[in-house]
């Protein structure tokens, strides 16, 4: 078992970790906010960069809903949110902010 990928690895299902588009397989590298559009850039272990616009989905059901200077917030379901920051910490919470 490979460890050290995340401090939450005990709580993350194998299915989640094997999903190529799982947020847990990305690192936050950029947040760009503009007057009309806002974007977030994520990078995976292969070096592939994905840039999402606000309200776009990373994968089915994982939608970018908020950006703050230090983190991006994804909606995962009803009352379920994922916060990712530049320290590669991902927190699952029932609070979007």
Image (spheres, grey):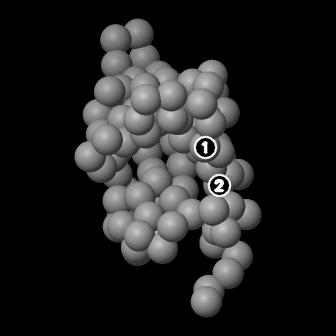
Is residue 80 placed above or below 97 in the rendered structure? below
Looking at the image, which residue is at 60% across and 43% down?
92
Instruction: Using the image, tell me which numbered label, if any, was put on residue 53.
Output: none
Task: Say if residue 54 shows up in the picture.
Answer: yes
Q: Position of residue 89 (x, y in %)?
A: 68, 52
Q: Quadrant of residue 19?
A: bottom left
Crowd around label 1: few <14 · some 14–19 · many ≥20 (10 Å): some
Reading the image, the residue beneath label 2 is: 88
Task: Say if residue 45 shows up in the picture.
Answer: no
Q: Which numbered disc, 2 or 1, marks the residue closer to the eye?
A: 1
> Does 27 sit left or right of 51 as displayed?
right
Reading the image, the residue beneath label 1 is: 92
Q: Position of residue 96 (x, y in %)?
A: 57, 25
Q: Residues at badges 2 and 1 in contact (C-beta under 8 Å)?
A: no
Q: Position of residue 49 (x, y in %)?
A: 37, 57
Extreme residue in the top direction: 35
Is residue 23 placed above or below 45 in the rendered structure? above
Looking at the image, which residue is at 65% across and 45% down?
91
Secondary element at image label 1: strand
Is residue 41 placed above or below 31 in the rendered structure? below
| Of 47 and 93, the residue lying toward us | 93
Alpha-carbon span between mark 2 and mark 1: 13 Å
> Does 54 sit left or right of 28 as displayed?
left
> Does 21 sit left or right of 33 as displayed?
left
Crowd around label 2: few <14 · some 14–19 · many ≥20 (10 Å): some
Number of labels in the image equals 2
Secondary element at image label 2: loop
Looking at the image, which residue is at 67% across and 81% down?
3
Q: Quadrant of the N terminus?
A: bottom right
Looking at the image, which residue is at 32% across and 27% down?
55
Q: Position of residue 79 (x, y in %)?
A: 51, 28
Extreme residue in the bottom direction: 1
């Amino acid at each position: 078992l490979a460890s050290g990928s995340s401090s939450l690895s005990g709580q993350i299902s194998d299915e989640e970790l094997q999903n190529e588009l799982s947020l847990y397989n990305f690192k936050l590298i950029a947040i760009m906010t503009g007057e009309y559009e806002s974007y977030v850039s994520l990078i995976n272990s292969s070096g592939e960069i994905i840039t999402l616009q606000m309200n776009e989905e990373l994968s089915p059901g994982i939608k970018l809903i908020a950006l703050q200077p230090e983190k991006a917030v994804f909606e995962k379901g009803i009352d379920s949110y994922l916060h990712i920051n530049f320290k590669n910490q991902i927190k699952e919470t029932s609070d979007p902010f």
